[in-house]
Amino acid sequence: MRIPLRRIAALVLAVQATVLGAAQETMKPKKQPYPPVQEPREVHFPAFEQKTLANGLRVVVIQHGETPSVTVQLLLRAGKAFDPAAKAGLASATARLLREGTATRSSQQIAQAIDSVGGTLDTYGSMDSAGASLQATSDQLDLGLDLLSDVVLHPSFPAEEVERWRRQTLNGLQVQQEDAGYLADAAFDRAVFNGHPYGLPEGGTPESVGSLTRDDLVAFHREHYVPNQAILAVVGDVKAADAFARVERVFGSWPKGKEHEVAKVETAQRGKPRIVVIDMPDAVQSEIRVGQVGIAFTDPDAFAADVYNSIVGGGPGARLYQEVRSKRGLAYGAGSGFVKGIQPGSFQASTSTKTDSTVHALEVMLDTMRELNKTPVPAPELESRKTYLSGVFPLQIETPDGIAGKVLEAMKYGLGREYIESYRGRIDAVTAEQVRSFAERRIHPESALVVVVGNASAFLPELQKKLGQTEVIPYKELDLLRADLRRPGKAEEKPAG
Amino acid sequence: MRKRNIVWPALALAAAVPALGGAAPLKVQPPQLAAREHQLANGIKVLLHEDHSVPVVAIQVWYHVGSKNERAGRSGFAHLFEHIMFKGSENLAPGEFTEYIQSIGGRYNATTDFDRTLYFEIIPSNHLERLLWMEADRMRALDISEANFLSERDVVKEERRLRYDNPPFGRLFEVVLGNTFTRHPYKILSIGSMADLDAATIEDVRAFHSTYYVPNNATLVLAGDFDPQQALGWIEKYFSPIPKGKEIPREIPKEPDQTAERRVTEYDANTPLPVVMLNYHVPEEGHPDLYALEVASRILSDGQSSRLYRKMVYEQQIALQASGQSLTLEDPGVFFFFTILQQGHTVDEGEKSLVEEIEKLQSQPVTTEELDKAKNQLIAGQVLGRQTVNGKASDIGHFAVLLGDWRLVNQQIEKYQKVSAADVQAVARKYFRPENLTVVHMLPEAMRPSEEKK
């Protein structure tokens, strides 16, 4: 009776976090020596076979027979990068509605078919891409491919389903509007990308969701769901020749379409910081985001960037976690990350802390970032972070889903097995000087974007004293479609206190 | 290691009533799990499952202690230890444990629930001996200093704010448990209350530790790439010197039988849409009725074709989510029906709709298609859950710790296969009775009637 417990586990279980990194701690004198470490077993990415169909669809099959299961993942160039500004949420809505009816199946028939075999079929939109993914036992591959290809190739976007989606999404947005963490991320993205669709909220806003039409969805699908910019991975208990034949059968007649490029993201830095406070008077915690535009996946600095991030905020061994949580107990978690796309994505550091320590935590975050721009990383710390980045490889390829994710990521950027296999070596080659140089050239704490969602009256004077000019927006007036983030027609209000 | 904000919407899975075509039984079965069993003289139970497909190994240390073992007024201790366990031991500096695991590309975490606490790491297999030594060090000689206690208590308070006090619907589960249980410690979340966390002293914390975090209350599970003979040698070498503790106290206040329906309405600033939860007491883990209740849960809630999703979310469009599922625990748990209403719909509509589905389960047998679908979902769920060494270790450990026999892990599907439509109807009648019910309505603060406004 495990499963129900797991399903609610997210809620019931308090899950742990961590502690101090050894790098900045004095080691205890050991009474016992460390026991030895054995010789590592070499591990390689599984062999894969690749084919391009006549219509341009790239297909990769990886045999992985450990459990009788199979994963199919399709990646399309159809993410929010192609959302028109006033239609934020279009890419995501198109993906979401794929499974709500096709030329030959109703929404309930699709649900019934996949549920009956205990599988899952998900369709989603993300930054550059939209995707469809299927997980099932391996005896259901034919059914799975039929369903997946049907929803991707022949969605009918029934008017009734569009309205059903609209009502549900508007209700969901109402919940998100009360979620400080969501508001912080959404406002940060909107501000950091300064109008580029990467910054639009994936799920849209009440205004954009209210105005999307069925015609919008049909047009977006026709334009962006094309095989010549799509990649399909089949991983699991299947034979390659067999899988290719089945894929050809369901996707072979998919007609080619127009190709699309993602608009350029402006990477020039502002000269000064932008500080945005979203006032939520009931909040007991402040959600803090600090960052800037980051790098593209294929940036030559990408390996140095991964090492840099692992030092500053990649997990509990990293500095932000140590400084904010472990040394000061200011938060449950603190970290950072690059989101990399076809174009440069964001670099963002984040935490959440009790209202009273808002400014303190923010200053610690900024100081941690400044420090790395000035001082080279000590050798032991660098070493431990690099071994972390390369050592995680075997864990990433344990499941069909993990393998499919890795291969699709590489293929999306025109890279192959060589990239996946050489990643560990390239990380290992990054030097302390390369990390410092990367930070100095590409990371700019002095002109960072700062977004804080919390009870502004309690920290605003201190924040303004420390960081200067601040934009304050009552959370009910946040408008993610506008550059000033504020619904038109309201003058800036000062919170009481 | 930021965790996603977890809110109630993550909980409800969709579900539905077929009638649109049947479900043929799957041709595959979940792989059977084999384990080698051993017990050390100090009481540690050891279970070893070999799997060499990737050079990684999952190490799990289970302590049979959870929030239900906490005394009244001292909630949150089991979870607090999750934090202190990473703060150093005789041979390990604060944070060294996690730093080491990270530096080798491993993953680690711990979870505390009502009945047990689980510490686990998944590591490249060549580091197994060293990690066993590190686990043994913190079992033998944990550093429970005042400083560690105070800093981690602050972190836990931030965790509580992050998960429960600040996000939408964050307080819901606390209200549900606090009203469904009157005496049993399941009435309090494992995170504990702010007041109890503030009142805790280092002496309380040390006493709790010396009682429950001892070899005779521990189960060690390894799954993955290792030689069992060699691993057992290391386990003997590092864990055997740890002295056995006293006998573990197992007296937990019992929940008295409920004799009349209870109703609670709460207004809450972090509840953006109205919520209804109908909560019924159900038996403890291992009880035969739970298999039919789990099948009922799948029919009600698993997938967009499930009954509650199809009716309330899809057809009536009154709900954002709707589900019925059980929280099965070592002592008698809860089966709860849950719905978040869409804007403009009332808790009365939501409750009426849920009650109709409960009555339907009681008055008519579920269809063969529904039954087959539920069983396929259970089988596929097990197949997919066993793709990782950590998933396998968790399955083995769960049955070993909570039911005393890991072999039960291989008997679950067979037990689900035996569930009939009549069984589902029978458990629905037996447990979903008004006198066994606690109704919780959570409403947005703005909906509070004006005479009640503070």
Image (cartoon, grey):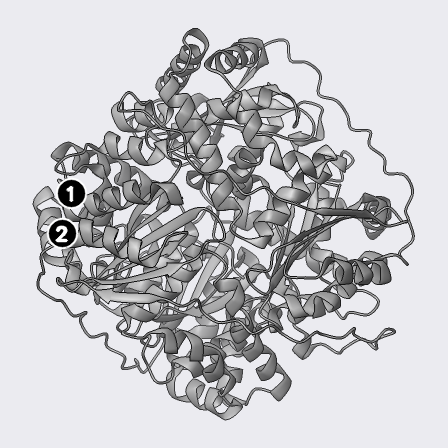
Q: Nearer the viewer, residue B28 or A203?
A: B28
Question: Where does the image place residue B90, in percent across and percent down from the top left?
Answer: 84, 67
Image quadrant assignment for residue A156? top left
Q: Earlier in the sequence, mark 1 or mark 2?
A: 1
Residue at mark 1: A155
Discs 1, 2: same chain: yes
Question: Where does the image place residue A297, in percent across and percent down from the top left?
Answer: 33, 75
Q: Residue at position x 27%, y 36% from top?
A: A168
Q: Residue at position x 54%, y 62% from top?
A: B1
Q: Residue reaching furthest bottom?
A: A433
Residue at mark 2: A221
Q: Are marks 1 and 2 in contact (CB under 8 Å)?
A: yes
- Quadrant location, the N terminus of chain A: top right
State the SS at label 1. loop
Question: Where does the image place residue B278, in percent across and percent down from the top left?
Answer: 49, 21
State the SS at label 2. helix
Q: Residues within 10 Å of mark 2 (few under 14, many from 20)?
A: many
Chain for mark 2? A
Total numbered labels placed on residues in the image: 2
Q: Residue at position x 33%, y 58% from top?
A: A240
Q: Is residue A234 left or right of residue B258?
A: left
Q: Nearer the viewer, residue B81 or A454?
A: B81
Question: Where does the image place residue B403, in percent across and percent down from the top left?
Answer: 71, 33
Q: Residue reaching furthest top?
A: B363
Q: As shown in the figure, which amino acid type bears the numbered disc 2?
A: His
